[in-house]
């Protein structure tokens, strides 16, 4: 009788080897090789043999022969969530929602389930972390009480599969994918192989039955979704919930979307009754803005398909150390160092002995070049202790030679400024040549950084 051999599996990437290694050859992680018992190894091999399926045998087709499909979208009843999804939920789609613990992922999906269930759809909420009573307590607090919303507390995939085959739901929520496991596999829940196989089973179910599935994903301390990276490749949509649990505002951002733009952003406000979408983010972001204070400037930033007015703040003070500090929140640190060098060289603002602190109010992150001019203006305002008028908006890209370059969608930005009562704007001169300013708004076209600083703070 042949001797049964054990195998070693990497808990990080699933790499298999017949002998133990300190460093995994697959992913390079140390001390992640775990020994599998002979029975467990045999079960793993057997399970893999059962999972092998023959191909479809389909023939190649020309592009013009493929029939077109217009994917129907269902509204979740939450406007900001629909915006990030690209207009609503697509039938048969697999969506992954990640975020820090307590950020509001389960709350948002439970609210969306209520609207979908009230519209006549069958919704199955499967929780591997909470009991049915715990979910009932949250549902009562949120006012969720639809009869078409079914709750199942289960984390074994074979048992959950039997239930959804009996119920045949139109929408399903798995909270969370890291707690689900397949009993025929020896690895623990949350391991690479378990997450991959559970997600693969849910993907096949979604594509064959047309049921749209939401997966809730845990995140690591670095902020990435826990588990194998292939999880994000398998799903159709990846959403990240961002924000500070100590504050009421939350940001929902799409980093992958096969059915829409990945630049869309949704804003929510946390209340006792759940997540409330913020329909007018510009007013929200400027509601607590300090007026007549040096070091504050407003930029109309473009997030996805809509402009939002954002308050950029700067604080400059004489350094107490040999090397001045550069601290930024919501803006790239390398870009800040570049702009400060241009500001000192081309506009004559002395910064060699100044500590500079930058903050983008509201917890947003500005990455577009149109924010360059506003950041330079607010730093110059703080250094010279001169206020930028509160009803002025500033936008433009700054080059190394101090030139102000044109930006995109300038008319839409100015229209948003005019809607909120701004009377003046400083924009690149190239944009000023080709746009029509909103009625009642003065537009100053500038060609250099020094010219912009002179107009704004004299």
Image (tube, rainbow, N blue to C red):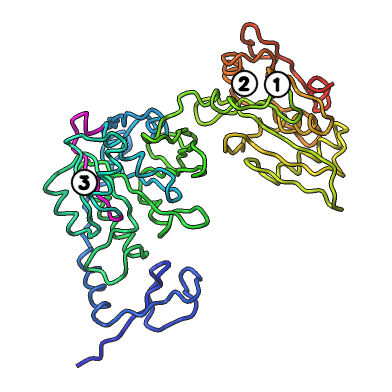
- Tag 1 or tag 2, which sits nearer the N-term? 2
Label 3 – label 2 distance at C-alpha? 48 Å
* Magenta span: 116-129
Q: Which residue is mark 3?
A: 151
In contact (CB < 8 Å): disc 2 and disc 1: yes
How many numbered marks appear?
3
Taking the image as shown, residue 86 lies to the left or right of residue 323, namely left
Report which quarter residue 404 is drawn in. Answer: top right
Please tell me how crowded label 1 is: few (under 14), some (14-19), or many (20+) other residues with Cα within 10 Å: many
- Tag 3 or tag 1, which sits nearer the N-term? 3
Label 1 – label 3 distance at C-alpha? 54 Å
Q: Which residue is mark 1?
A: 427
- Tag 2 or tag 3, which sits nearer the N-term? 3
Name the quarter where the C terminus is drawn. top right
In contact (CB < 8 Å): disc 3 and disc 2: no
Helix, strand or loop for disc 2: helix
Q: Which residue is mark 2?
A: 410
Q: Give the residue furthest to the top.
A: 439
The residue sitting at 40% across, 56% down in the picture is 230
Label 2 – label 1 distance at C-alpha? 8 Å
In contact (CB < 8 Å): disc 1 and disc 3: no
Taking the image as shown, residue 174 lies to the left or right of residue 339, namely left
């Amino acid at each position: 009788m042949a001797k049964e051999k054990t195998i070693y599996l990497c808990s990080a990437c699933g790499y298999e080897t017949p002998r133990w290694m300190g460093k995994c050859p697959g992913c390079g992680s140390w001390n992640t090789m775990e020994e599998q018992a002979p029975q467990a190894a045999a079960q793993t091999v057997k399970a893999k043999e059962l999972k092998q399926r023959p191909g479809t045998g389909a023939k190649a087709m020309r592009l013009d022969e493929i029939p077109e499909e217009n994917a129907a979208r269902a509204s979740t009843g939450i406007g900001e969530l629909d915006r990030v999804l690209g207009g609503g939920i697509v039938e048969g789609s697999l969506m992954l929602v990640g975020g820090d613990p307590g950020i509001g992922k389960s709350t948002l999906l439970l609210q969306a389930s209520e609207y979908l269930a009230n519209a006549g759809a069958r919704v199955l909420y499967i929780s591997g972390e909470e009991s049915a009573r715990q979910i009932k307590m949250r549902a009562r607090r949120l006012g969720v009480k639809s009869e078409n919303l079914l709750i199942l507390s289960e984390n074994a995939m074979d048992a959950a599969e039997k239930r959804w085959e009996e119920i045949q739901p139109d929408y399903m929520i798995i909270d969370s994918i890291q707690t689900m496991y397949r009993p025929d596999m020896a690895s623990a829940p949350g391991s690479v192989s378990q997450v991959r196989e559970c997600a693969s089973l849910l993907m096949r179910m979604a594509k064959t039955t047309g049921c749209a599935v939401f997966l809730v994903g845990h995140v690591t301390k670095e902020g990435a979704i826990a588990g194998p990276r292939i999880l994000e490749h398998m799903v159709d949509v990846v959403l990240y919930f961002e924000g500070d649990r100590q504050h009421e505002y939350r940001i929902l951002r799409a980093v992958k979307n096969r059915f829409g733009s990945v630049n869309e952003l949704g804003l929510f406000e946390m209340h006792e009754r759940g997540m409330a979408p913020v329909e007018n983010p510009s007013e929200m972001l400027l509601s607590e803005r300090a007026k007549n204070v040096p070091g504050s400037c407003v930029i109309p930033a473009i997030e996805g398909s809509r402009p939002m007015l954002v308050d950029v703040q700067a604080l400059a003070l004489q350094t107490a150390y040999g090397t001045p500090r550069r601290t930024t929140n919501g803006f790239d640190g390398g870009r800040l160092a570049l702009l400060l060098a241009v500001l000192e060289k081309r506009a004559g603002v002395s910064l060699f002995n100044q500590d500079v602190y930058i903050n983008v109010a509201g917890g947003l992150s500005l990455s577009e070049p149109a924010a360059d001019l506003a950041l330079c203006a607010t730093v110059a305002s703080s250094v010279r202790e001169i206020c930028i008028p509160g009803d002025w908006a500033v936008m433009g890209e700054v080059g190394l030679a101090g030139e102000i370059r044109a930006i995109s969608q300038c008319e839409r930005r100015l229209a948003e400024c005019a809607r909120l009562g701004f009377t003046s704007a400083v924009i690149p001169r190239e944009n000023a040549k080709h746009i029509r300013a909103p009625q009642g708004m003065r537009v100053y076209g500038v060609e250099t950084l020094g010219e912009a600083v002179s107009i704004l703070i004299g």
